[in-house]
Amino acid sequence: MPGGIGTAAGDGAPDSDGHPPPAVPADATPASEKSVRGVLSRLPALIAVTRGPAHRVRFVNDAYTEVFGPRTTGTPARDALPELDELGLLPLMDQVHRSGKPRTVKARKVTQGSPAGPGTPARQGYFTFTCTPVHHGDPDPENRGVLVFGADVTDQVQSAERLRESERRLHDTAVTLQRSLLPQELEQPDDLRVAATYQPGGTDAAVGGDWYDVITLGAGRTALVIGDVMGRGVRAAAVMGQLRTAVRAYARLDLPPHEVIQLLDELAAEIDATQIATCVYAVHDPSEGRLHYASAGHLPILIRDPDGTVHCVEEPTGPPLGTGGWIHTSGTVPLGPGCTAVLYTDGLIERRDQDIDEGVAALTRALAGATGAPQVICDRLLRSLGVTSEHDDDVAVLVLQYPEHTGSDAELFRNASLDLLGGIEAAPRARAFASGVLASWRFPNELRDLGVLAASELVANSLKHGVPPMRLRLRRTDRRLIIEVTDGDEHLPRRRRAEPGDEAGRGISIIATIATGWGSRRTPGGGKAVWCEFALPT
């Protein structure tokens, strides 16, 4: 810029002998400098010009005066322009004076002076300040100066803040929507301890499609499911909500895992053929100590044995849901007392800079060292895998433990079974066995009588309509008594109204009347199981 602003006399600085400079009449100011001053004075930006290492004030324009009030020229900026010190600009001006290179600081908050009237608070705004060297080529430091240019960016800053606040509200709303589609409270089975966690990914407003559920099936069995609809947004969330609802409906049919996955596969294609979804559905039977499962393109279940060994359950796995044309199959794996199983979505282990197998290996190592209650394990796995609130993908983790029952718990969780060979002696043997077992478990007489009656009716139904092999199984937990009869025929019984003259058809009606609940299902390899349960008094 023209040198008049940075070099004209009359700014109060002493000469080389220490004497004050002579006064310069106002009309002695060069015309070029007057022109520059006139232009700068009319600019809406804040302008201040200083000279020398002490940054003596040479000029401030009208906009600067309006914001900070009048300033005295010839005085060092530290005294005359204290606001520059408060804004942290003086060190920056020192750098500019020495180096001759401009420097900028963005969006500094400024309290504007001269309130509108008594009791009126001062206005606050935001300015971006640029410090530019003036006459840096002059060898005399006293002749070099700095021009401070302050641009009002209040509107931009406030707009950006409003945008961030809007995005934050949208993200919070999206997370609330996602969580509302997940179970508000997990069902807690008698024999398993279960916990789950969901961590939304990123800070954008798009919801994800990760989901999980725990469904008690009756007879002590529990279904566990976890899935992931690929992508983000309302469409992914909508597909996820429909799949989760369908799983609960299919689970109530007590179908084998592969049949549930098969039905989900067909449903997913009908809902939205463009959406890719993975899912694993598993059923735990405490009487067998096994986990039956089927997977549609999902990551393998991890199981931690009582000795700390962790292994992947990898087969069988079919393609993702909605692809069609694939016949899914079920697998089974031991899950006895003391074991822990982990189901999870890819957000837990997948990283852009590593292979997914490395992520599974890292999770395996983390699970090997994770002990404690299921919720504690969930939290430890998230920490070990580096999942934070800034993680860029949704994460769902479902942990189940089959605890070992010792001490007083061992008295509450007990099993007894009797193989039935058929013939007319099977029914009285079953009644005697049930009576003796229930007496040894110290049930009240009323509950014991109901249990013996239920066992007798279930065995009679199996003898009449089933085929060997037959077995009566009794199980008690801390909350219920379960009576179950299995046989080799796969035709499931139906409850029907028996007419007064009918000799058959009353057994299941009696069971439904006296028991808290009843049901039936097909068993692997053919055959069926018919069960009923009684809630124990609290």
Image (cartoon, rainbow, N blue to C red):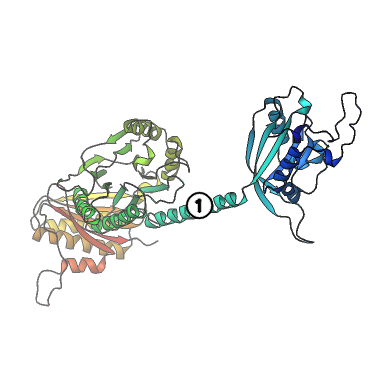
Q: Nearer the viewer, residue 32 or 270?
A: 32
Q: Secondary structure at mark 1?
A: helix
Q: Residue at horizontal 67%, vertical 49%?
A: 44
* Residue 307 visible here: no
- What percent of the width, then of the height, locates residue 484? 21, 55
Q: Quadrant location of residue 143?
A: top right
The answer to whether residue 263 is left or right of residue 447 is: left
The answer to whether residue 480 is left or right of residue 317 is: right
- What percent of the width, then of the height, locates residue 179? 41, 54
- What percent of the width, then of the height, locates residue 262? 19, 50
- What percent of the width, then of the height, locates residue 377? 42, 41
* Residue 312 visible here: yes
Q: Residue at horizontal 64%, vertical 29%?
A: 101
Q: Residue at horizontal 55%, vertical 50%?
A: 160
Q: Residue at horizontal 33%, vertical 31%?
A: 355
Q: Quadrant location of residue 140?
A: top right
Quadrant of the snapshot with the N terminus? top right
Q: Nearer the viewer, residue 143 or 357?
A: 143
Reply above or below: 31 against 522: above
The answer to whether residue 102 is left or right of residue 61 is: left
Q: Residues within 10 Å of mark 1 (few under 14, many from 20)?
A: some
Q: Nearer the viewer, residue 3 or 222?
A: 3
Name the kind of residue labelled 1 in the image.
Arg
Query: Which residue lies under the disc numbered 1?
Result: 168
